[in-house]
Amino acid sequence: MTTFRELGVHPEICDALERGGITTPFAIQEMTLSVALMGTDLIGQARTGTGKTLAFGIPVLQRSVSPKDPDYAELPQGKPQALIVAPTRELALQVSSDLTLASADRGLRVLTVYGGVGYEPQLEALEAGVDVVVGTPGRLIDLANRKSLDLSHVHAVVLDEADEMLDLGFLPDVEKLMRMTPETRQTMLFSATMPAAIVSLARTYMRHPMNIRAESSYENATVPATAQFIYQCHDLDKPEIIGRLLQAEDADKFIVFTRTKRQAQRVADDLAERGFAASPLHGDMAQVAREKALAKFREDKIRVLVATDVAARGIDVRGVSHVINYTCPEDDKTYVHRIGRTGRAGATGIAITLVDWQDLHRWKLINKALDLPFDEPLETYSTSEHLFHDQGIAPGTKGRIADPKPVEKKEPRERSGDRAPRNRNRNRTRTRSRGGEVVAEVKTTESGEKQVEKVESSAGSGSGSSSSRNRRRRRSRGGGGGQGGGQQGAGQNSQGGSAPAGH
């Protein structure tokens, strides 16, 4: 079996990798290193999770001048020697972590730059001097526009996950960055797929690139070590299904992918209420909160990470046993990158896709594009026997490990803010006649006794008032001149006191 040392990797890099438990190169690394170490431009195409980071990371580090080398003093001090562009913050952090591990003995300074955090630490690091910059397109351009990032001396540029940068609309930014670098640079482009726009980019900015493909076709882009299950199920039953999957025999860490940020938050909150250590990961979270969630996931402080597709490209965490597509992916590329978070680096994994009835057509297109044998997903509920059998769930397992919280009864809020509520306990009750006149009142004394008092009304005023109302009522019902008659009757009452009913 070939080793890194036999491929001509620098001994200091080999030592650092061995301390990190990395001794044997993967296929894409073995095929790439012999070409990249000579400074040749190359296009690497391989499925996700096969070790592409070190395939370009080792050549970048080895061909950079170390501060311990005599030639280091001849370089423009503090200017980056290499640039690596990644589509997402998470992927940039992951690449930077791998490069920091591999360059520990070389003494190269690696800086990660991305949006969502303050400029000051990144500006201070650039002013102090760095050797390798890893970043997202937007923040890299911002720093270059500030004249803080000088890319005129880089010897190597790497475009990682180029197809994802195309999907996110970063291609114009990438082209702008490429124009800031020397034409004599080495350019390495890595991508799981090769859309026409990426091919055009390669033709424009690369010189006779070597094409390296780790597998025969994209149809085989899914990881063979990942067992795939496709279930057709109802949206309201999905949290219960996931709760039971979390208690399966081989369940370790889970990544649940959702289509929207709101859905990710809702699913994470639901799983936490069921007693599982879960956290969301989506774009509405502050960058500090996202990094904390990923750190807790890596340190086994949480078992479930509920993420949107933005995070699909950057999560490289050991021990992810299950990936669950809470919603059907948009297309075959998204499906490949989602399930690629498990079964990484030779490990095995399980990918489960929960397809709603309305997404059946979309799933059939994905199934056809990837040539998968799941054209008709099996209708599945949280109580289905085949779900328990497929996933190794013990009979009788429920979808929660914590009792539901009691529902607290909320006191009705007062309409008038902080004012004291009005006392609606009346101490008297009035009795009215059919004509609307008060004929009696029932009063409550301080001792609690009720007294009925008859209300006397003058016959003249009562008769006049009653006759006036009756006259107005009769005239309005007649429909002809009711308004004028009513006004006339009212005028007579106001002037002459009591008028006979038949006047």
Image: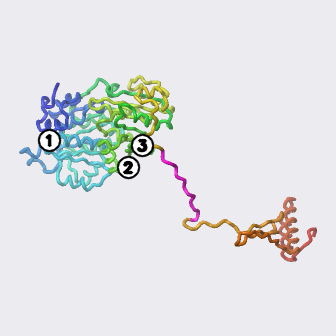
Question: Which quarter of the picture shows residue 247?
Answer: top left
Please give the residue where the numbered disc 3 appears in the rendered image: 275
Secondary structure beneath label 1: loop
Question: Which quarter of the picture shows residue 162?
Answer: top left
> Can residue 199 be seen?
no
Magenta span covers which residues? 404-416
Where in the figure is residue 63, as x and y percent of width and height? 14, 39
Please give the residue where the numbered disc 2 appears in the rendered image: 285
Q: Is residue 376 left or right of residue 44?
A: right
Q: Residue at x 41, y 22 (%)?
A: 373
The residues bearing labels 1 and 3 have C-alpha atoms spaced at a distance of 49 Å
Q: Give amino acid for label 3.
A: Gly
Secondary structure beneath label 3: loop
Where in the figure is residue 498, as x and y percent of width and height? 88, 74
Q: Which marked residue is nearer to the observer: mark 1 or mark 3?
A: 3
Secondary structure beneath label 2: loop
